Image (tube, rainbow, N blue to C red):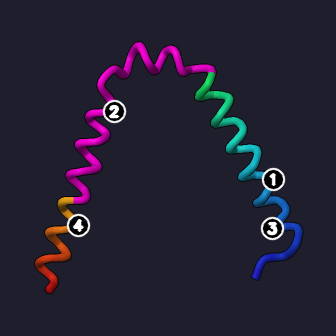
Amino acid sequence: MFSTGQLIFALFFILAFTVVLIVTYRKDKTIHKKNYKGFGWVGLGFTVFVIILFLIKHMLNK
């Protein structure tokens, strides 16, 4: 399906992308704490809302 070169490229791309994301997040961590207070609650509420929607969908399909 994929050649060896393509698989190696994908592996290195994913590795490099992950490293860049981690470094960038650590660099901006203090700014995020200051500007995005309370985001954890919003994220938790959104996650609970999506779970409830999936449960309703599952119940209505029975």
Q: Which mark is residue 27?
A: none
- Neighbours of disc 4 within 10 Å: few (<14), some (14-19), many (20+): few
Residue at position x 19%, y 62% from top?
53
Could you say which quadrant of the image residue 1 lies in? bottom right
Label 2 and label 1: CA atoms lie apart by 32 Å
**Where, by quadrant of the figure, is residue 41 drawn?**
top left
Tag 3–tag 1 contact (CB < 8 Å): no
**Of discs 2 and 3, which sits in the foreground?**
2
Q: Which residues are magenta?
A: 27-51
Q: Nearer the viewer, residue 7 or 37?
A: 37
Residues at marks 2 and 3, CA–CA distance in whole angstroms: 36 Å
Looking at the picture, does residue 43 appear above or below residue 15?
above
| Placement of 38 over or under 4, stated as above or below | above
- Give how far across and how far down residue 23 sits, in percent: 68, 29
- How far apart are labels 2 and 4 at the CA level? 21 Å
Real-space Cα separation, disc 3 to disc 4, in angstroms: 35 Å
Q: Which residue is mark 3?
A: 7
